[in-house]
Image (cartoon, rainbow, N blue to C red):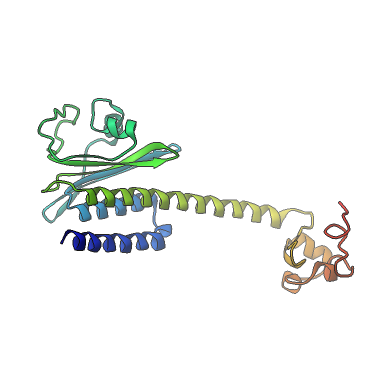
Amino acid sequence: MEEITERKLMEQVEALLERLDKEAFEWTLPEISCFCLQEGMKLSDSPVGFLTYSYKDKQSFISKINIGNMEADCNIDKNMLYSMMLNEETLFAEVISERKPLVINDLSSLALKTLPDGHISLQRVMVIPILHAGKVLGMIVLANKETDYSRIDMDVACVFARSGWSTIRRQQAEKARRESEARFSSVFNSVQAGIVLIDAQNRKIVDANPSAMQMYGATLDETLGKYCHETICLACSNTCPILDLGAT
């Protein structure tokens, strides 16, 4: 029964990760964080959870409490929570120093004096670090499951911690790439010098800016895909001054 339950659970996880991979590029960073936290809470039957990370001066904080059919956001000041994470007297200290998950299924023996006034009572807790380049950038915290947190609970939470952060990093890289392409396109199309891009492998023209087309007296559609030695430099095949004859 345990094997069947675990297999069904991992099938759910795979389906959720597939959705994350396909749809997340259209989501905001808080939406990605919220998705990972909420699904982690559902799969581990945790009514309490929060996810936080801080990277390159950007911070994300999502906290949820599910009691019965009611879902609410935690109203604790997030700056207080950040300071709690860095406090060596809290549960988070071991996670940060060891860079590995922590599961405590009986908190009654611990004096959690660092919890803010009014914080919901905690019975069980699972803390999963979000790692990047060997450093803890944040964590997913799931709490108050009715039964003990198990190894599979920890494995699932770790998967969402890794996949969520990996998705955020890919999204950031894609955004940076698009911005770089936009800057290049702006310069490429506005510069007064004629620029023609040629594929060095097949010698075909793959792009040219408006200044080049004005000099050449043709449109871009007429030029794309043609061999450079038949268009720009009227030479015989395999006699390119630069690629074949060594000119600079």
Q: Residue at left 56%, top 53%?
A: 177
Residue depicted at x 23% and y 32%: 91
Residue under the point 65% across and 56% down: 185
- In the image, residue 153 lies at what x, y percent? 22, 50
| Number of numbered discs overlaid on the protein picture | 0
Residue 60 % position (x, y):
35, 43
Single out the residue that lies furthest toward the bottom: 222
Q: Position of residue 45 (x, y in %)?
A: 17, 53
Q: Classify residue 75 by image quadrant.
A: top left
Q: Tell me the quarter of the image containing the N terminus.
A: bottom left
**Front residue (pair 69, 236):** 236
Taking depth in this image into account, of 195 and 139 the one nearest to the observer is 139
Can you tell which quarter of the image residue 181 is in?
bottom right
In this picture, residue 239 sits left or right of residue 55: right
Q: Is residue 97 above or below residue 153?
A: above
Q: Is residue 56 above or below residue 234?
A: above
Between 98 and 16, the one nearer to me in the picture: 98
Position of residue 147 in the picture relative to residue 53 (left or right): left
Which of the 4 image quarters holds residue 62? top left
Residue 147 lies left or right of residue 79; in this view the side is left
Please state the horizontal and vertical placement of residue 154, each as a whole percent of the image: 25, 47
Q: Is residue 86 above or below residue 241?
A: above
